[in-house]
Amino acid sequence: MPPRPTGALLGILGVAILAVVLLVVFGYLTVFLGPGAVIIGFVAALIPLAVVLAAVAWIDRWEPEPRLALVFAFLWGAAASVAIALLVDLGVQIAALLTTGQPTEAVLSATLQAPIVEEIAKGLGLVILYFAARRHFDGVVDGLVYAIVIAAGFAFTENIQYFGLALTEGGPAELGLTFFMRAIMSPFAHATFTVLTGIALGLAARRHLGFGAIGYALVGLVGAIFLHALWNGATYLVNSFESYAAYFVIVQVPISIALITITVLVRRHEIRLTRARLGEYAAAGWFTPAEVDMLSTWPGRRQAKAWARSLPGNRGQAMAVFTRDATRLAMTRQRMITGRNELVHRTSEAELLAAVTEARRRLLAP
């Protein structure tokens, strides 16, 4: 179902503004590091970005978020969050020089300033999406997805800076070490922090909260700041690769396992909801029991896609549309029966039912 025209226009405007901010940030990095270092840093930063976005695609397969919202999330992380962090750091440094004559201590900046400022900046993007995309931001999976995409954008720009700086200051050897630490050992670091804010807002969405969701966001933000500070502080405590590896295994691995477990559990919850809600439509004659079985399991969806591709003209895309709209229909009904009627109108349900009927017609056409 396409977004409403006004919402789409506002989304496009937001994306355009963020794209301009991203160009300004890249311009700053180019002046600061030099064109060659920025280009090399950009190419190197694409690798961990691809890994994180692949994880997002895996998480978001069941009920994909609107592309416009995902683009906004990425640009918010890559542009707005970074710009906010840079401006705040500039202000803090100027204030420190004016009051003490010395810049702020690196350890203080890394363990206190950076976690607070960066997580607030990323969390602000999540809050904007929560209110601007309420029809799609309706659960924990959505909060996870948007949080990871914002974090991926932030890490992408930050990695360009770190990789470029390593190259200019230490040459290829320093770049290789920095790439290993940030791209191989910890590509999900920022996602691990910010996802707590996303989960909190996802829980608020399930309770169909309005401005009360800000309280949830603040609770998640505290956790995000703590994990960020813990991660940054470790760089001042470990003094060898062995100690870093021990810290990673003892602290970061359990946190990552916990977040993966949460992701799997909430995705299973979405699948159960899909079956239950589509079953209600089947009882009213909109779906057959076989279609419900097909649409509410991963094996069923894979077999359906393979079958559609074998039809004359390769109707795999039509099956993808049928599956997508049926899932959105199930989630729309879930919002309706849980009291979130302010986010759903009967026209939305009718539009999705019409879209599902049309997709089925194209699938089964001779």
Image: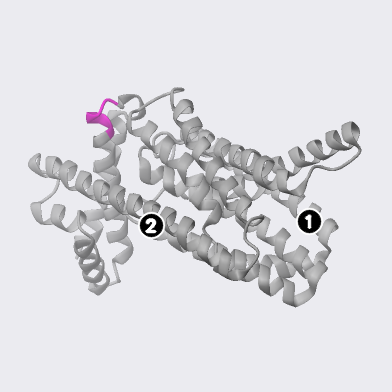
Query: Start and end of the magenta stretch?
Result: 335-339
Q: Decide: is 335 above or below 293.
A: above
Q: Which residue is mark 1?
A: 29
Element type at mark 1: helix
Which residue shows up at 63% across the image and 56% down it? Answer: 237
Front label number (1 vs 2): 2
Which one is nearer the viewer's eye here, 214 or 347?
214
Numbered-mark total: 2
Residue 211: x, y in percent?
46, 22
Instruction: Locate residue 245 relative to residue 265 in the image: left or right.
Output: right
Q: Which residue is mark 2?
A: 257
Element type at mark 2: helix
Predominant secondary structure, magenta span: helix
Type of the residue with mark 1: Leu
Q: Decide: is 227 above or below 247.
A: above
In what quadrant of the picture does the N terminus appear?
top left
| Residue 120 sits in quarter | top right
For disc 1, the neighbor class at 10 Å (few under 14, some 14 to 19, many from 20) is many
Residue 148: x, y in percent?
49, 51
Type of the residue with mark 2: Ile
In what quadrant of the picture does the C terminus appear?
bottom left
Earlier in the chain: of badge 1 and badge 2, it is 1
Is-magenta flag for residue 43? no
Quote the CA–CA distance across marks 1 and 2.
35 Å
